[in-house]
Amino acid sequence: MTSMNMVQALNSALDVMLERDANVLVFGEDVGFFGGVFRVTEGLQQRHGEQRVFDAPIAEGGQIAVAIGMGAYGLRPVVECQFADYIYPAFDQLVSAAARLRYRSAGEFNAPLTVRSPYGGGIFGGQTHSQSPEGLFTHVCGLKTIIPSNPYDAKGLLISAIEDDDPVLFFEPKRLYTGPFGGHHDRPLETWAKHPAGEVPAGYYTVPLGQASITRSGGDLTILAYGTMVHVALTAAAETGVDAEVIDLRTLWPLDTDAIIASVGKTGRCLIIHEATRTGGYGAELSALVQERCFYHLEAPIERVAGWDTPYPCEFEWDYFPGPLRVGDAIRRLMAA
Amino acid sequence: MKRDSSLHLHIPHARFRPGDTADFSYLSLPRAGQSPCPPSDAQASATRDLADGLVRVIGDDGGAVGPWDPKLDPGLALKGLRAMLLTRIFDDRMFKAQRQGKTPFYLKCTGEEAVAVAQALALRPDDMCFPTYRQQGLLIARDWPILDMMCQIYLNPKDRLKGRQLPVLYSARQAGFFSLAGNLGTQFPQAVGWAMASAYKRDTKIAAAWIGEGASAEGDFHQAMVFAAVYRAPVILNLVNNQWAISSSQGVAGGEEASFASRAVGFGFPGIRVDGNDFLAVYAVTRWAAERARNNHGPTLIELFTYRAGAHSTSDDPGRYRPGDEYQHWPLGDPIERFKAHLIRIGAWDEARHQALVAEIETQVDAANREAQGLGVHSNGPHHDPATMFEDIYKEMPQHLKEQRAEMQRLRVLAGRAPS
């Protein structure tokens, strides 16, 4: 085991897969010589050569289209979309092509590509470097969507994504790259060095898709979270003193419905939290699921805490970000019901 | 310079609309044999005149002339003629089947048969094609069974695509024919990716992609051009300019002020405009581009200048947006008639053999059609089991899809549409 932050863990996953499988290629804006603006591909071109790790033109639609063609040939391309906010030019290629290729060709062709993309807020990136667009993709059948919350999961999930024969969107909460973040922006930065999930095997391992992780066990309330919000949930649970169970979904699709049903069946209360805007967000799907499957166990209405339904405002980041204040408030309201 | 007192917006117009008499004399059409043929490793700048010109080989008298004459082997020529005829007769038969309600949709390539057929023959059989829906001639020229195509059109139980796709949106991996997209243009940059993969694997296969002049306005076209140029991908990018995108003339797609082929020169690779109704010219230009790609000199953009003789599809009436007889005025003629005249002129063919071949193909198409219809048609089945709609969304079917499938089946049984 080695201590790694999330950037190093992701780098290690790419390194391991480039080493193991000659069909794996890595490309995107600035990922080659420079090693990526967040350093996730640092050193990979030097180690694996420019045929396998290279810079791509700034055209996300082109990058993902090219990856689909490579996938049809038999490669396993990994594309870095520099910010999730930049993925929209590729929407048609993801929705109409990548997600449908297996279906429309009745299995003759598939698109085993992985799209990595730094995601979410907390870095004063304003509305073009902070978005959480996962709900646009979880709505599309044929895609898989992953959002890790720590270095260990990030590496194991990324390896699973690359080995997966379906197209995978892999959103990396960039606020978690260098350390866990419980939502108090005014407190000293933490690092992964002392966190158990910062202990990462140097070699190959996988974390399977479709398995949630119970990050904190509890009996009174279930909090469903992913990405940065897992750490916010832990902070809020500690600050309210409520015996909350925090479930880190890890993969939004495929979704571990059994883990959710079991937990809410036990606690009878459910809080769903995400950074993405609230209306029509992934939390709405989770809420519907809990209502349909756990209705007779519920002792309080299901609550959602999410980003406000506004663009992500630069200066007002900490009024926008659904931090421990809002999550704690919802916990107290749920427990009072 | 003319000066205006205020701005005005330019809206391109089709030259001719219903009621007009089409007159294409404004087109500058060089005579056959006049275009130079540079070496296939030429720089983009050496093709500037070719991009604005028109490569033609078959002259008005039916002879093949000039440096682009591919000196086609007679056996291959007759294979090409046969594939073009089969494509046309197949199209006519399937069009009628749509009018009879046996398929919800059909789309012909009448007048454009030389594009796909000559290009298929200029490629190697395992080169990968990323076509549009108007290159059915690729499958036919590659000897793909027309029965298989008909079963897809009729959406019957032998449709390999399980009744999911709009008729004519084929997929035939074994024939090097990529799954057709209804979202026009998406295949263009995907072909570049396939070609990049082939180059990365030090393979010998190249890719070829097709797009219509209308869809070439999509970002996909421009991204394909950038990526193909940047990585010198072994790909042939074909733009079929058949003058019409449903009712919009090629001017609306950007063809008013410049040829489509000339775009390539700006991207740094060759662009060549070719008479798309001249079988030999299409073959020669494609072979040139294939040789260039296979020798690591990178992509070529070929503009195939042709005319969509029929409707866009069975869903539109061209009489509403263009003169009914516009095709009769098209100066580049009919690709099959021109190639036939050429073969007769060089003594490789005659009218009697031609009529016999047409009759043989009609018999072949009718026999396949009877067999396909016997296997099922759209209007009265049989079809695939609807439960198959839940397959192939992911490699393995997730639980929620199994549940949805069971729910649908339960209701089908309740409604008496499935046995209990």
Image (cartoon, grey):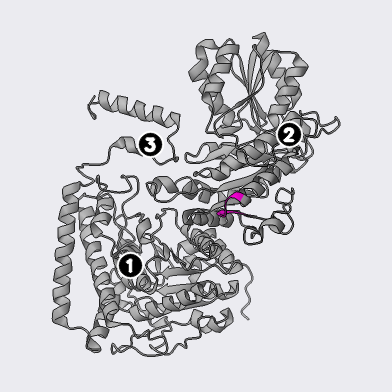
Residue B409 rendering spot, x and y as whole percentages: 31, 28
- Residue B139 sits above or below residue A212 on the image: below
Residue A184 rendering spot, x and y as whole percentages: 80, 28
- Magenta stretch in the rendered image: A20-26
Residue A268: which quarter of the image? top right
Which chain contains the residue that carries disc 2? A
Label number found at residue A199: 2
Q: Nearer the viewer, mark 2 or mark 1?
A: 2
Relative to B370, B111 lies left or right: right
Neighbor class of circle 3 (other Cα within 10 Å; few <14, some 14-19, many 20+) is: some
Q: What element carries label 1?
A: loop
- Residue B206 sits above or below residue A38 on the image: below
The answer to whether any part of residue B256 appears in the image is no
Nearer the observer, B241 or A249: A249
Residue B362: which quarter of the image? bottom left
The answer to whether any part of residue B133 appears in the image is yes
Question: Residue drawn at (40%, 45%), measured in percent from left and top?
Answer: A103
* Residue to which mark 3 is pinned: B390
Give the Cα distance between marks 2 and 3: 41 Å
Residue A207 rendering spot, x and y as whole percentages: 60, 34
Give the Cα distance between marks 1 and 3: 46 Å
Question: Residue drawn at (67%, 50%), measured in percent from left and top?
Answer: A82
- Residue A284 sits above or below residue B33 on the image: above
Nearer the observer, A174 or B90: A174
